[in-house]
Amino acid sequence: MKKMFVYNYREFDEAKFFESASEKYQIEIGYTKEAPSLDNVKLAKGYEAVNVITTKIDRPLLQEFKELGVKFITTRTIGYDHIDVEAAKELGIGVSNISYTPDTVAEYTIMMMLMAKRKMKRIIERAHIQDFTLPGILGSEIHNSVVGIIGTGRIGETVIRDLSGFGCKVLCYDLYEKESVKEYATYVDLDTLFGTSDIISLHMPANESNHHMIDKKAIEKMKPGVLLVNTARGALIDSEALIEGIECGKIGGAALDVVEKELGLYYNDLRYQPLDNRELAILKSFPNVLVTPHMAFYTEEAIRDMVFHSLESYLTFIQQENS
């Protein structure tokens, strides 16, 4: 019997999809709303596979899963930097991530660009207190902008395609160029993109090679007043360098759906607690910085894909084991 244990289970949006997916694929599923930890790891006893989201899965936790007989861990997220993949490999535990339609993040990215260009944070905040004055909220139009896209994978390419409809000039950078992207954008080197773009948007996974790729030196190469957009991973931007760039005026604004050290903060109700992330607290205080809590993925279509694909990855693992 195929068996999987699901952590961080959410009744309000995932339940109907887990029910239909488990029935379709004949997988027995156990659930808990809790995040995986050493305190509740034994809930997975008797299950061959474990299903998680963006919660830390480190070596000690992996060792406990191994002792319980867990052979496979799937994360129902695109990113997998919260899992110690090397430790899992050493322990003989398979790891997989999932994919979902790139449109969900691409559309959100463009929404963030437009909101930042039109100073929507200030407009909304003023409207709440019935301040309907005009000074300080004069926006600009995106069709007059040069937009630089770093990373032309599925999401980056979709952003580029969608931006083409606005009439703006699009530059892009990636280690691996794609002919399909060249229809809408021009590949340039990174320094050219930094020095030419009015808006820079990040679209790549986080790893050791690109950690803090947007640092003090990169920001110094950018146009004065540049707008930074990040719907990828927080570790791509050095938060301290970003804060310094905003404070000195080199960076004209930022739209951030992800930030460094967000793990353990987002998706929790922390209304009455101090925010345990100094850089995030500072960024939220700037009138020209729009911060959302890692929401770019969050659509009905994406949640369905995340659930179904996480179960499908388990089936693929079983087939590979039996082949």
Image: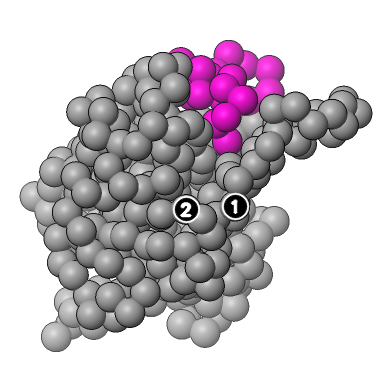
Q: Position of residue 322 (x, y in %)?
A: 18, 82
What's the residue at 37%, 74% (across, down)?
184
The reply to whether callout 2 and callout 1 are in contact (CB within 8 Å) is: yes
Magenta-tinted stretch: 270-290
Q: Position of residue 235 (x, y in %)?
A: 31, 36
Residue lying at the far left of the rendered structure: 90
What's the residue at 51%, 24% (across, down)?
283
Q: Is residue 275 magenta?
A: yes
Task: State whether residue 258 appears in this view.
Answer: no
For label 1, count other residues whose C-alpha is less than 10 Å away and answer few (under 14), some (14-19) or many (20+): few
Of residues 85 and 156, which is closer to you in this image? 156
Q: Quadrant of the N terminus?
A: bottom left
What's the residue at 18%, 79% (across, down)?
320
Task: Report the disc number at residue 141.
Answer: 1
| Amino acid at dot 1 | Glu
Write down the residue under mark 2. Answer: 145
Where is 63 relative to 153, above or below? Answer: above
